[in-house]
Amino acid sequence: MIFEIIIKNVQHISELSYSIDLSKNKLHGIVGKNGVGKTTLIKAINNLQSTDTYQKTASPYIFNENSQITYKFGDDNYEFNFNEKLNIIDTKQIISSTAKSSIFVELPIPHGKRFSHFQKLGNIDEELRKSIAIESFVEPIELIEFLSNVYDSNRFDSLKEFSFKGEKYYFILKDNDYYIREDYFSSGEYFVVSLYKLIQGRKKCITIDEIDISLDAHAQVNLIHQLREFCEQYEVNIIFTTHSLPLMKTLQDDELFYMSKAEETISVEPKSYHYVKSLLFGFQGWDKYLLTEDEVLLEYIEHIVFGSEEPIFYQYKVIHIGGADQVVSLMRRNESEHFLTEEGKVLCVLDGDQRAHRNNLLNDNVVCIPFESIEKDLYQLYLAGSAEIPRLPAEIDLAQRKSPSKALFKELIKNKLMSKVEIYHFLELQKQVETEEFKAVLLEFLTAD
């Protein structure tokens, strides 16, 4: 089921588009520079579930006569337009109960529920006391395990659960019937418990602005690992924004999305951690930059430079970004924004299989290694029975691996059959002329003024 939002002429945003397939049950971590529109998107999602969101959380001056937010939720389409009399955006359409019940949004400070919870459970305190007196509570094993994994602590071992009017509540039972209600947990702990409740309730689209607030870096990383499992187990999607570098690093490539502005449109696109890190945090201070696809290619470049007798006077940085498109995209973005360095001092080094994609090669600062890739060429020669590549132990079945070529490269090194340097030298002997030409281009870039 597709959930799509298009925001037009709201605050500083001319147009912002965002789409998620809710049938995939995934994490969606959205990152971007301050002010690009992350919180505006979060409020827009909440607006479908609670149509007075903007009246409660924003100034009326963010709208004008051209303001509009359109939604596609499965087969349903909704349109919110500017109401001149009320100076807000609203709709005359009836939002389906399915859409409303499928969405939960944790808004930013000070509107988020995690920041206003201190009086939430006061009205059930008497029932809680009764529950303790007659021991009508249970141990929430899964939640205890969840909290213990997030915080690496056993302080939740005495957590209890009791139900009242169809709702579940949690407390930590101490000696002499002393107890700590969930609303007296720390704001981070209360937030994690609340998030667990939402997941258990199978809210299809759980959205959280700044998920890292109130959680230390270690807890953030642990939380992501746990949420990834819950998304699959309970068939939910969790959309969140973050500024946390440790948290971003934990996300997989299809879980991390970068929000950026291109001309008048703000888009949200999947990007690798290294792409995002380069844009948001930068590697400034180096004279020249080499952008590559992956760590194997990065290490091969460093092998060439270290093994060269050419004097390298410039400080340089090799960064592996992700796919070829992201590598070239980052270089081109640097040409306009200069977040790394000035134009002409960034070189993209791609695998040889990118030669077929000529769009990547229409720039003097994009070059390819002489091999399809280190792993692919090695694998093809292995399959061809090259006597210079040792055979792997019989119990290692490359055909069962997700990427046999990458598996071969790793297994040869892991089993101490070939070192990385030996692999490089072996492949270079297969294409000596092309290798020398590539090395010359690489070293020319690093040594030329």
Image (spheres, helix red, strand yellow):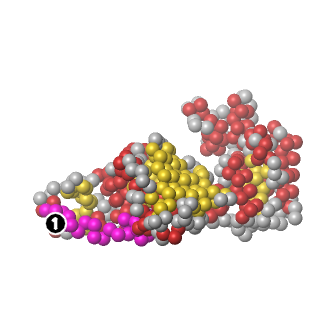
Taking the image as drawn, is residue 246 in sight?
Answer: no
* Residue interval drawn in magenta: 107-130
Q: Position of residue 101 (x, y in %)?
A: 36, 50
Residue drawn at (81%, 51%), measured in percent from left and top? 363
Q: Nearer the viewer, residue 100 or 366?
A: 100
> Pointer 1: residues within 10 angstroms few (<14), some, or many (20+)?
few
**Quadrant location of residue 76?**
top left
Q: Nearer the viewer, residue 26 or 79?
A: 79
Height in image: 165 above or below 129?
above
Q: Residue furthest top?
A: 384
- Tell me the amino acid under the disc marked 1: Glu
Height in image: 414 above or below 70?
above
Q: Position of residue 206 (x, y in %)?
A: 42, 54
Quick one: SS at disc 1? helix
**Quadrant location of residue 259?**
bottom right
265 part of magenta stretch: no
| Quadrant of the snapshot with the C terminus | bottom right
Q: Which residue is mark 1?
A: 126
Residue drawn at (59%, 51%), measured in percent from left and top? 270
